[in-house]
Structure formats: structure tokens, C-alpha cells
Image (cartoon, rainbow, N blue to C red):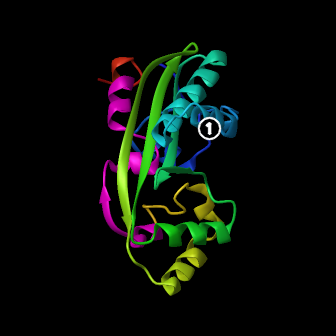
Amino acid sequence: MSRVILASQSAARSQVLAGAGVTFDRIVSGVDEDLVKSRIQGDGGSPRAVALALAEIKAMTVSTGHQGLVIGADQTLEFDGALYDKAVDRAEARARLLALRGKPHFLHSAVALALDGEILWSETASATLTLRDFSEAFLDHYLDLEGDGLLGSVGCYRLEGPGAQLFSAIEGDYFAILGLPLIGLLDQLRQRGALIP
């Protein structure tokens, strides 16, 4: 079997990949994400383009110095055409969820597969999520439940946790919402000898 490396420090991505039965090592890319975002947006790139660029750069960076198939992934949140980063504290998370309340936003999740510094394959999947018109009392209760854990997600929620109660509608691939479009990736890993076909 070919070695598989996940170029991510995301616990959610690791759980998705491990849950699918993939054996992998984890090596953080060290890519300066803010610099990449600034460059892509400065060139007129969309939040979707930012996610793909970050996934590809992470995969290429790690694959340059390590043997094996390297998976890079990233996710961006788009709301009213703007790109949102992870909240830095609870106050920012609260403000973000209030801004999203009752409205749709988009999660763009990109995944790339690299070998020896070259991209072999990439894919971007988008999902539309609509937050319900929740009360501020619910929001404060939710923030207390999740604590600083919600700062690890660009949307300030975990769909696989109490964050599921925030939504009125979800359209899109579940794995993309978790930050790792999985079905196409698994097919690529099978084709390249990392999984049993």
C-alpha cells in the first residue's frame, strides 16, 4: 500500500479520514495561510478559489519533503460575498453567529492530492447552510456548551455536535461540511494503490 499523509492539523479532518478506514500519517504544512489568502483575494479570487489554493499549496509543500501521497485540504466560509476567517475569541464568534442568524452562507471545502511536489488531483465542494432564527438565550447556552472549541471552525459550529441545533436548512455534501470532501478522494486513493480497490 502507498503511504498516505494528511497535511493538516484539523482534528475533524483526521476523524473523517480515520473513520473511513484510511491509515495515514499527519504532517502539518506550515503554510502561511494569511499570506496565501491575501495574494488570492488581491488577484480577485473568490472564497472558493482561496480554499482550493490553500489545499493545493499545503499538499505540494508537504509532498516536496516527504514520500507518499499527500492530502491537502482547506475550507472557507463565504457570507454576502466576503471571506470569513476563524473567530479569534468568543465575542467574535457570538457576533458572527448573530450576523449569520436566519440567513444562508456557503462553506467551500477543497481537497488536493500531491506526490513529489506535484498536484495529481483536486476537487472543491460547496454547501449552503442556513442558520435558524435562534434566540440570544439559545446562542449564549450554545457558546457555553462549546467553549473555545468553536474557535476551531470557520463557522463557529460543529455540525456533528450541539451546533446541529443552529440550522434550519443544509444543502450539500456532509463530508464537505466537515472540511474534507471524501468520496472523490477515496476513489483517487484506490486508483493510486493506497486503498484496496
Q: Which residue is more in the foreground, 195 or 156?
A: 156
Residues drawn in magenta: 162-189
What type is the residue that disc 1 sits on?
A: Lys
3 in relation to 30, above or below? above
Please provide percent x and percent y for residue 190: 34, 23
State the SS at label 1: helix
Q: At 43% from the left edge and 61% from the top edge, which residue is drawn?
A: 160
Instruction: Report which residue position mark 1 lands on.
Output: 37
Residue 1 in view: no
160 in relation to 50, above or below? below
Q: At 46% from the left edge and 33% from the top edge, which residue is drawn?
A: 111
Residue 125 in view: yes
Please provide percent x and percent y for residue 129: 37, 59
Q: Which residue is more in the foreground, 30 or 129?
A: 129
User: Hey, which quadrant is residue 5 in on the image?
Assistant: top right
**Badge 1 local density, few (<14 within 10 Å), some, or many (20+)?**
many
Magenta highlight on residue 169: yes
User: Hey, which quadrant is residue 120 in on the image?
Assistant: top left
Magenta highlight on residue 147: no
- What secondary structure is the stretch in magenta mostly built from? helix
Of the 4 image quadrants, the one containing the C terminus is top left
Q: At 53% from the left edge and 30% from the top edge, which residue is drawn?
A: 53
